[in-house]
Image (cartoon, rainbow, N blue to C red):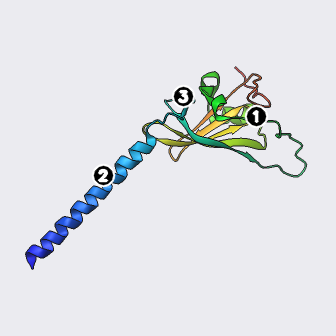
Amino acid sequence: MKKISFLILAVFVMVTCMSNVKSNSTREKTLEKNIQDIPIGYNNLFLRGEIVKKENFEDGDNSDCSDWILDREQLKNILQSMEKVDATEWYAACQNYPCWYEGVLLNKTSEYEIIINAASYIIISNEKETLHFVLDKKSKLFLIPCYTEG
């Protein structure tokens, strides 16, 4: 009886260990770069999948976002032309437009959410950190520029 109990316990431990190894290797594979991923120009981060346009208009808001269209190819190395700033400077320098795009960024160790606002700023965040990037000059990619002091 002891041999059977020991054998059952050993099989259970083996199956549990193999399951953990398999789920970890699956997670690592999802963080590896795919051919369709777009580099965004910061910390070896790549845009994974599509970006989705979002809008949130309040009463009396007359912002026009209908002509603002981004595709993922336009985001290639976008952060190289933008300035990384702290949250206080971002808040003071940029307006907030009621339209933005959302997507997912990956590097080999982390996953982030990206928000690209029509008012020339990008926010990258996950559970550990939030990063702000602004553009203080006109660009065909955004509706209006941020106005940073420098």
Q: In this view, does 85 lie above or below 18?
A: above
Res 42 label: 3
Identify which residue is drawn at 82% across, 49% down.
Answer: 57
Query: Which quadrant holds residue 74?
Result: top right
| Tag nearer the camera, 2 or 1 | 2
Distance from disc 2 to disc 3, alpha carbons, whole Å, reads 30 Å
Camera-side residue of 149 and 146:
146
Res 119 label: 1
Mark before the other along the chain sequence, 2 or 3 = 2
Amino acid carrying mark 2 in the image: Val
Q: Is residue 16 left or right of residue 95?
A: left
Amino acid carrying mark 1 in the image: Ala
Q: State the image coordinates of residue 85 (x, y, percent, origin top left).
A: 62, 29
Mark 3 neighbour density, 10 Å: few (under 14) some (14–19) many (20 or more)? few
Mark before the other along the chain sequence, 1 or 3 = 3
Distance from disc 2 to disc 1, alpha carbons, whole Å, reads 44 Å
Camera-side residue of 128 and 43:
43
Identify which residue is drawn at 36% across, 53% down.
Answer: 23
Res 21 label: 2
Mark before the other along the chain sequence, 2 or 1 = 2
Query: Which quadrant holds residue 13?
Result: bottom left
Q: In this view, does 150 lie to the left or right of 30?
A: right
Are dots 1 and 3 in contact, CB under 8 Å? no
